[in-house]
Amino acid sequence: QVQLVESGGGLVQPGGSLRLSCTASGIVFSGRNMAWSRQAPGKQREWVALALASGNKNYADSVKGRFTVSRDNAKSMMYLQMTSLEAEDTAVYYCSTLVQGTTYWGQGTQVTVSS
């Protein structure tokens, strides 16, 4: 079955950096579009970045220029390098993929930006 596992979250000061990882199994990773999303307390989940199977990447305006998404197809992993973190980036971060009409999500990893 499809399984996505995020890691790398933690507590970081404003202006700091973190790298999140997403490990996928149960899919042909190289052929799948992958996404990062986040959900802050009391807010709806929002899309953050896309790493398409084609190699293209897309970012939400709120993170453009600060976050970089990448993928390693050989390892079935996707990454989110986050820099210049702000308090507003505090959220649970999820990776996801769409397979035959079903969106699969990981369990999420908490990112807290605070001094």
Image (cartoon, rainbow, N blue to C red):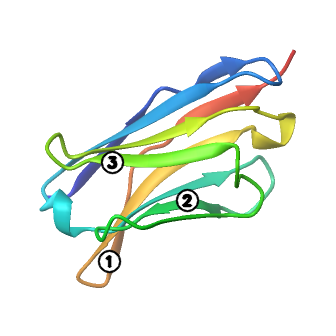
Label 1 secondary element: strand
Point out residue 68 in the picture as x, y percentages from the top left corner.
55, 46
Residue contact at pointers 2 and 3, CB within 8 angstroms = no
Q: Which residue is mark 2?
A: 49
Point out residue 33 in the picture as x, y percentages from the top left corner.
33, 68
How many residues crowd mark 2 within 10 Å: few (<14), some (14–19), many (20+)?
Answer: many
Quarter-of-image position of residue 87: top right
Which label's residue is closer to the chain start, 1 or 2? 2
How many residues crowd mark 1 within 10 Å: few (<14), some (14–19), many (20+)?
Answer: few
Q: Which residue is mark 3?
A: 71
75 relative to 53 in the view: left or right: left
**Three-letter code for the amino acid on which mark 2 is drawn:** Ala
**Three-letter code for the amino acid on which mark 3 is drawn:** Arg
Viewport quadrant of the C terminus: top right
Q: What number is the disc on residue 2?
A: none
Q: Which residue is mark 1?
A: 102
